[in-house]
């Protein structure tokens, strides 16, 4: 495992993403071309927590999927710590909205799945998976199957499965979109704790402005037709942040983002 | 709670079987149809006792079950293996899919003559007919199951660093398992159908042979014994299958 440098600003030196001139196209069913993402440049600093916000269909998932290696770039490049991303790569962890847990494995089995690429002894693998489950407060539920867990618990298993192998980046596509407000707040706390403990870079897609403001260092606002980043907002609010203790900065940022999202895309 | 439900189910089953026997008895005993053509439950019961005392009831059962079991095992194993390959390996898929689509509509009974020519009237031809029928059902279901494995499972598996080998065994196979199990259940039922088809000609023992043999002497009572045996065996087998498969793919009913 990489010993990641811990410094005050929670920025580390591992997990920097450089996106240059990236554009993505799909073939539409009628044979035409969909410009899902217009030429985009984006630098995501190592160890930072970055959100993408934008209306449905603006290319948030497409951008994320490109970093994950699930979709091919039409132009441009994505580099992770200077190395070109071409294809799926276990250094980039993905948390899916619909969890994508394997229903045939227990919670423990799902987390262990991520550790099988390392040559660990069975006992060690189990211990590490158990520790990850403990970190997301699922101690005692390791033998339950995804079908027996609530949505929030499933997403915690999915999170544990992702961070247990210490990827440099976590990609999260509306991971809490299907959860109720109360569960979300718990998930935010857990996610921030995990992120701080493991020093990874997080790229987080959401359409919930408050969620972005609570979680991230930076929020990139996107607009569609074709998808692009129209504005970047630095969020300097001190951590730890709380939804029930918002300050003036938070409100200013919130108004700004909502104003941008409301603007009809030209 | 659970046992309570079981008890009610058992009660209903008993009741409906008694009802069927009662109606059968009334119809057969009414004299409207000759008892030589449509025997009463009592006559069928005594025919069963007679067959048992002759020793053929049990030996037929053993012979037929062995044939069905061996044929099923061969067909099911090949069906699963080839189904996984045709669904997940595109070269094999392109080569085999059209062929298998052509073979699909051929009923088991149509294969009996050619099986006898190829494998003789011994056990070989029976195994062939049964395993072929089972194979088709299992192959089809396995193929469609393995073909529609959700893309997110594959993406998740690969981004978690699983090799293609591990993806096959830990993702593709379990994700297809619910379909495979459906195929096996269907295959088990078909094993019975084709067993009888195979035994009706060129056999000297087995439930199918006994049915054909009874026809020579117009022993409808013995024929009924054979039919009831097949019904009971098939139903019992299906129940066993359902309970095993519920356990095997437990996450499907969660
Ligand atoms: N696989 C695909 N094939 C064709 N079009 C796609 C595909 N994936 C996404 N798109 C199109 O690309 C655009 C951006 O989609 P997406 O990135 O999913 O948006 P978002 O996640 O912001 O809602 C949409 O117009 C969508 O219809
Ligand atoms: Mg999306």
Image: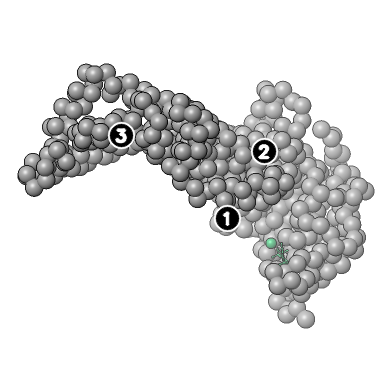
Front residue of B220/A129: it is B220
Q: How many marks?
A: 3
Q: Position of residue A190 (x, y in %)?
A: 66, 45
According to the image, label 1 marks what residue?
A: A179
Query: The N terminus of chain B lies in which quarter of the figure?
Result: top left
C-alpha gap between disc 1 and disc 3? 64 Å
| Residue A149 can be seen in this image | no
The subunit carrying tag 1 is: A
Say yes or no: labels 2 and 1 on the same chain: no
Q: Secondary structure at mark 3?
A: helix
Q: Residue at x 65, y 41 (%)?
A: B85
Q: Residue at x 85, y 63 (%)?
A: A74
C-alpha gap between disc 3 and disc 2? 47 Å
Extreme-left residue of the structure:
B30
The subunit carrying tag 2 is: B
First in sequence: mark 3 vs mark 2: 2
Q: Position of residue B81 (x, y in %)?
A: 61, 36
Say yes or no: labels 3 and 2 on the same chain: yes
Q: Residue at x 36, y 25 (%)?
A: B204
Q: Position of residue B212 (x, y in %)?
A: 30, 34
Query: Which disc, if any, is residue B168?
Result: 2
Q: Position of residue B80 (x, y in %)?
A: 57, 37
Query: Which disc, if any, is residue B212?
Result: 3
Q: Mark 3 and mark 1 in contact (Cβ < 8 Å)?
A: no
The subunit carrying tag 3 is: B
- Residue B189 appears left or right of A151: left
Q: Secondary structure at mark 1?
A: loop
Q: Residues within 10 Å of mark 1 (few under 14, many from 20)?
A: some
Closer to the observer: label 3 or label 2?
3
Closer to the observer: label 2 or label 1?
2
């Amino acid at each position: 495992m990489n010993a990641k440098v811990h410094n005050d600003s929670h920025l580390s030196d591992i997990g920097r993403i450089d996106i240059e001139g990236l554009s993505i196209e799909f073939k539409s069913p009628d044979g035409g071309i969909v410009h899902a993402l217009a030429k985009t440049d984006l630098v995501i600093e190592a160890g930072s927590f970055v959100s993408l916000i934008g209306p449905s269909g603006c290319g948030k998932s497409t951008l994320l999927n490109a970093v994950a290696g699930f979709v091919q770039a039409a132009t441009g490049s994505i580099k992770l710590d200077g190395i070109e991303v071409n294809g799926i790569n276990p250094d980039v962890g993905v948390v899916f909205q619909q969890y994508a847990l394997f229903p045939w494995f227990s919670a423990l089995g799902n987390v262990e799945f991520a550790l099988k690429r390392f040559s660990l002894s069975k006992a060690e693998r189990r211990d590490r998976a158990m520790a990850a489950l403990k970190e997301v407060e699922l101690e005692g539920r390791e033998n339950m199957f995804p079908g027996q867990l609530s949505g929030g618990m499933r997403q915690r298993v999915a999170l544990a499965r992702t961070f247990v192998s210490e990827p440099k980046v976590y990609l999260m596509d509306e991971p809490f979109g299907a959860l109720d407000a109360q569960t979300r707040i718990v998930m935010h706390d857990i996610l921030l704790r995990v992120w701080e403990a493991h020093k990874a870079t997080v790229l987080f897609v959401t359409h919930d402005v408050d969620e972005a403001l609570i979680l991230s260092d930076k929020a990139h606002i996107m607009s569609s037709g074709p998808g692009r980043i129209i504005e970047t907002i630095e969020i300097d609010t001190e951590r730890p942040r709380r939804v029930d203790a918002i300050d003036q900065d938070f409100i200013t940022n919130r108004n700004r983002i909502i104003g941008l999202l409301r603007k009809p895309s030209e | 709670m659970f046992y309570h439900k079981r008890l009610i189910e058992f009660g209903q089953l008993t009741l409906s079987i008694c009802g069927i026997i009662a109606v059968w008895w009334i119809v057969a005993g009414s004299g409207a149809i000759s008892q030589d053509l449509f025997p009463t439950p009592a006559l069928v019961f005594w025919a069963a006792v007679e067959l048992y005392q002759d020793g053929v009831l049990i030996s037929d059962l053993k012979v037929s079950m062995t044939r069905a079991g061996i044929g099923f095992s061969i067909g099911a194993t090949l069906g699963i293996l080839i189904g996984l390959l045709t669904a997940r390996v595109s070269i094999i898929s392109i080569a085999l899919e059209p062929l298998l689509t052509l073979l699909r509509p051929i009923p088991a009974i149509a294969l009996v003559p050619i099986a006898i020519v190829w494998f003789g009237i011994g056990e070989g031809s029976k195994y062939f007919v049964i395993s072929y029928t089972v194979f088709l059902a299992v192959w089809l279901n396995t193929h469609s199951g393995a073909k529609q494995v959700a893309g997110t499972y594959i993406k998740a598996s690969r981004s978690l660093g699983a090799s293609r080998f591990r993806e096959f065994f830990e993702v593709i196979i379990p994700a297809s398992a619910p379909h495979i199990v459906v195929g096996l259940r269907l295959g088990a039922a078909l094993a019975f159908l084709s067993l009888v088809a195979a035994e009706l000609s060129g056999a000297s023992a087995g439930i199918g042979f006994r049915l054909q043999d009874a026809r020579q002497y117009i022993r409808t009572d013995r024929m009924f014994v054979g039919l009831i045996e097949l019904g009971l065996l098939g139903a019992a087998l299906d129940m066993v299958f359902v309970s095993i498969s519920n356990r095997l793919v437990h996450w499907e009913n969660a």
